[in-house]
Amino acid sequence: MKRKEFRKLISVDKAREIINSLQVIPGKESLALENVHGNILAEDIVTEINVPPFPRAIMDGYAVRAENTYACSETEPVRLRRVGDLPAGSDAKFTVLAGETVEIATGAPVPEGADSVVMVEYSSEEDGIVSIYRPVAIGENIMKAGSDILKGERVLRAGRKLGTREIGVLSSVGKKRFLSLNCRWG
């Protein structure tokens, strides 16, 4: 069976002539974050903030001073006074002093004075007194400020096509407007 040709082809020289005759005028335009999908980034993006911007709990439990837990065990728990509750998204401010704790949810900012989080599985609470059954080390169950993205870090390079991942990164570092490449035919 003979194959039919459904298109006309031009020579390589003719194709080069057509391409060389095109006038592309590169430019830049400022776009809002919600309008950048599919565009090409015209500038490097360097973050001006830490992500996360504060140390946060990575487990539900109790924010404590680690030194207050060193002497505890399953048979002889340390008892700490609960002075507050920090759900995720809360802007409440607490200071944890010696012998105190604050109940904390995953993602919540670690209160002043606390340097670790005891997992809820290693504690119990009754009448505002929290029993801790396992010691923790300084920094345990805490994500440091800037552990995802550090202030001053280049998060995206110029020339990157902006898709959903890139837009998520841009949003997380607080960028609202961007320079995008655009081309016009002259």
Image (tube, rainbow, N blue to C red):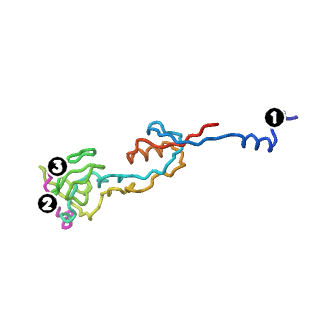
Count the numbered circles shown. Answer: 3
In what quadrant of the picture does the C terminus appear?
Answer: top right
Which element type, helix, strand or loop, lies under badge 1? loop
Q: Work out whether mark 1 precedes mark 2 in sequence or the reverse, and give the earlier one.
A: 1
Q: Amino acid at mark 3?
A: Gly
Residue that mark 3 sits on? 84
Question: In terms of sequence position, does the residue under pointer 1 or pointer 3 come before the other?
Answer: 1
Please state which of residues 81 and 91 is positioned toward the viewer in this rendering. 91
**Is 76 within the magenta?**
yes
Image x and y of residue 118, in percent? 25, 57
Any mark on residue 108, and which? none
Q: Look at 81% across and 34% down and name the residue there.
A: 8
Amino acid carrying label 2: it is Gly
Relative vertical location of residue 86 with respect to residue 145 in this rendering, above or below: above
| Closer to us: 152 or 1 | 152
* Mark drawn on residue 8: 1
For the point 34% across and 52% down, the residue is 52
Q: Amino acid at mark 1?
A: Lys
Range of magenta residues: 70-84
Query: Which residue is identified by label 2?
Result: 99
